């Protein structure tokens, strides 16, 4: 996580600026040193030789929905996540699933950041999604 790395340029920035201007986990990076492509932005952020960054950041819109799975029904979400991530990306809403049937404002591109009381690692979020029938989903959406 770029914002929490102890040796990153962003960490140095965060220690020298007021809290409301700090880059926080969950923020959406829109541009880094003029680059807008994710692969290029990541490369710049991981380059130890770069000592100055010009970063455009957007705070997420965070909201929650409660969804209940019916008997024999899935949530109807196609999900993507990687190791050491703190959210789960919603890649698609599956027609006929619980989310689609409930008509909730959940969209591809939204990120699940908490499930019921679980928050933190995506593995923990996935484990919570595999148990139970009613879920309180806390989601993050790019503005």
Image (spheres, rainbow, N blue to C red):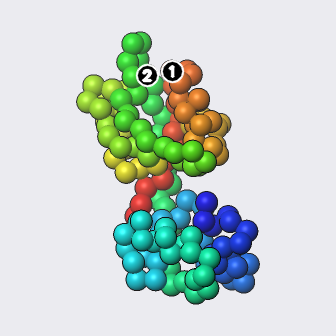
Residue 96 versus residue 66: which sits nearer the camera? 96
36 to 73, vertically: above or below = below
Q: Residue at x 41, y 60 (%)?
A: 142
Label 2 vs 1, first from the N-terminus:
2
The percent coordinates of residue 6 (x first, y second) are: 73, 68
Q: Residue at x 70, y 79 (%)?
A: 12
5 to 73, vertically: above or below = below
Q: Kindly state the secondary structure of the residue where label 2 is placed.
A: loop
Q: Quadrant of residue 25?
A: bottom right
Residue at the far left in the pictured view? 95
The percent coordinates of residue 91 (x first, y second) are: 35, 43
Mark number for residue 69? 2
The percent coordinates of residue 54 (x first, y second) are: 51, 84
Q: Residue at x 56, y 75 (%)?
A: 47
Mark pair 2, 1: CA separation: 5 Å
Residue marked by disc 1: 133
Mark number for residue 90? none
Q: Quadrant of residue 115?
A: top right
- How many neighbours does mark 2 have within 10 angstroms: few (below 14), some (14-19), or many (20 or more)? some
- How many neighbours does mark 1 have within 10 angstroms: few (below 14), some (14-19), or many (20 or more)? some
Residue 1 versus residue 30: which sits nearer the camera? 1
**Quarter in which the C terminus is drawn:** bottom left
Are the residues flagged by discs 2 and 1 in contact, CB closer than 8 Å? yes
């Amino acid at each position: 996580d770029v914002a929490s790395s102890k040796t990153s340029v962003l960490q140095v920035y965060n220690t020298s600026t007021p809290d409301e201007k700090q880059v926080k986990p969950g923020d959406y990076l829109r541009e880094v040193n003029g680059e807008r492509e994710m692969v290029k932005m990541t490369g710049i952020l991981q380059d130890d030789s770069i000592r100055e960054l010009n970063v455009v950041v957007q705070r997420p819109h965070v909201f929650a929905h409660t969804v209940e799975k019916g008997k024999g029904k899935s949530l109807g979400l196609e999900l993507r996540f990687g190791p050491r991530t703190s959210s789960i990306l919603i890649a698609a809403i599956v027609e006929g699933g619980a989310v689609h049937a409930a008509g909730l404002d959940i969209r591809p591109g939204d990120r699940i950041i908490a499930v019921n009381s679980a928050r933190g690692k995506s593995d923990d979020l996935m484990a919570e999604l595999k148990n139970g029938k009613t879920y309180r989903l806390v989601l993050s959406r790019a503005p």
